[in-house]
Image (cartoon, rainbow, N blue to C red):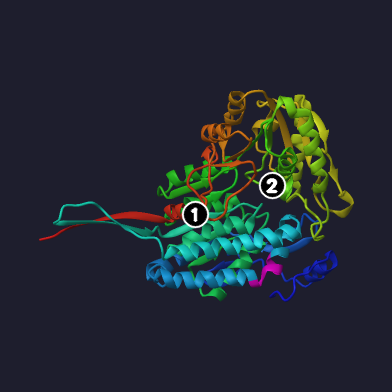
Amino acid sequence: MSDTSTPVTRQQWQQLADQLRFEGRAYINGASQWAVSGETFPCISPVDGRQLAQVASCDQADAEQAVIAARQAFEQGGWSRLAPTERKRVLIRFAELIEANGDELALLETLDMGKPIAHSRAVDVPATARAIRWTAEAIDKVYGELAATPHDQIGMISREPVGVVAAIVPWNFPMIMASWKIAPALATGNSVILKPSEKSPLTAIRLAALAEEAGIPAGVFNVLPGFGHTVGKALALHMDVDCLVFTGSTNVAKQLMIYAGQSNMKRVWLEAGGKSPNIVFADAPDLKKAAAEAASAIAFNQGEVCTAGSRLLVQESIRDEFVHMVCDALKSWHPGHPLDPATTCGAIVDQAQLDRVIGYISIGQAEGAKLVQGGKRIMEDTGGLFVEPTVFDGVLNPMRIASEEIFGPVLSVIGFNSVDEALTIANDSIYGLAAAVWTSNLNTAHKVARALRAGSVWINHYDGGDMTAPFGGFKQSGNGRDKSLHAFDKYTELKATWIALD
């Protein structure tokens, strides 16, 4: 399915959705196939509870096939030894095909995990294509080095592809998170095995077909849908996987490190969540803007965002006023049907995640926080999984709703008086993924930004940056960086070659 004119109404999107054919097979060595075991699992839409497809439930046998194919492709060199300019050409074609099939990919993303179609089409699809195109454009502009040596010696430092890369990606931004991994891995010449979440596998499977159409050789890009405890574990323990990259929960990230140590000490790069502080000082240059972005920071993508501004730290002198402004701003984030282009807040990905979000709302009330807005499941009659964006005030940082990642639209408001107090609260977390600071004081902005233990810090806005900025976290938010030229570090080995001249 290729785009002609993008639908603009819910009815048009629904008509297009009714025409979709869902592919549920794995993609190994250039061919679509069911799992060796024959096992499948149902792909259920959180929009209305209907089954979209049966999807191959891959396990160790499928992982073995994929790794063998990936290794053979790597060793044969049809991709790994291809000139960087040629890999660039193919990957740019891949990005073009993603754009050309944008309506279909957006629909798959929305139906599979519940996000609004307006966001899938305007955010997820372009960001995926942009990540692949930007990385492709960069790959023939990354040079090796020469060491400072005596006149009779030459010291060369070069990068080589690491080999076989297994990428395990989450369900909240299935295409974008995949593109952040597969783009630099492929660009640097590796073979890749992509394991999407069992909660949202459909776009990854579709990307495999587009990659083939773009000219990526058989065995170089493989997709294995299935569960973490089966195919994910098999890839993490495999002795012939050279590099494992992951975005997801902290507990799973820790287990993957253990698996790497138990197997072949494969390189492991992890992005493992956050509990990001959004710090608003009384002298913020525009409180209305700060409130609007605080609302977006917790409600966008139903709060299912690793960088969600789930801890809102507000200076006490403006706290009551600002909380009221945030609650008012959240009115524009009322959940609606995800295929309605006017919808800004969609469905929670599945029943287990909905139960988790509702459970944390109950925990917050039991802990003594004040529920000031939201807190209920709504639209049950649709068969979909919807919850109101929720605001708790009077939160203390040790409370579970303030210290544990919920991954839903639940905001914890915490008061502070001084800069030092704000920093103490903000850094009192096992996570260190992102943070934001709102102030008109240049000194405060720089002091706080420097002191925050976070991989990304935004000043007077929330969730900024593009492909030129590295993304990743401190502490238990993980290691390594996605995006930017720094991402190439994860998928290459440095080699020192020393030459003695006669």
Vertical comparison of 418 with 158: above or below: above
Residue type marked 1: Ser
In the image, what residue occupies the spot 75% across and 40% down? 288
The magenta stretch spans which residues?
100-105
- What residue did someone put label 2 on? 304
Nearer-N-terminus badge (1/2): 2
The local secondary structure at tag 2 comes to loop
Q: Quadrant of residue 93?
A: bottom right
Mark 1 → mark 2, Cα distance in angstroms: 24 Å
Report x, y in % for residue 52: 75, 63
Report x, y in % for residue 314: 70, 30
Q: Quadrant of residue 71?
A: bottom left
Q: Quadrant of residue 2?
A: bottom right
- What residue did someone put label 1 on? 484
Image position of 275 (left or right of 355): left
Q: Main secondary structure of the magenta part?
A: helix
Vertical comparison of 448 with 85: above or below: above
Image position of 186 (left or right of 354): left
Residue type marked 2: Glu
Q: Nearer the viewer, mark 1 or mark 2?
A: 1
Q: Quadrant of the N terminus?
A: bottom right
Taking depth in this image into account, of 241 and 492 the one nearest to the observer is 492
- How many numbered tags mark residues here? 2
Asked if residue 468 lies in the magenta stretch, the reply is no
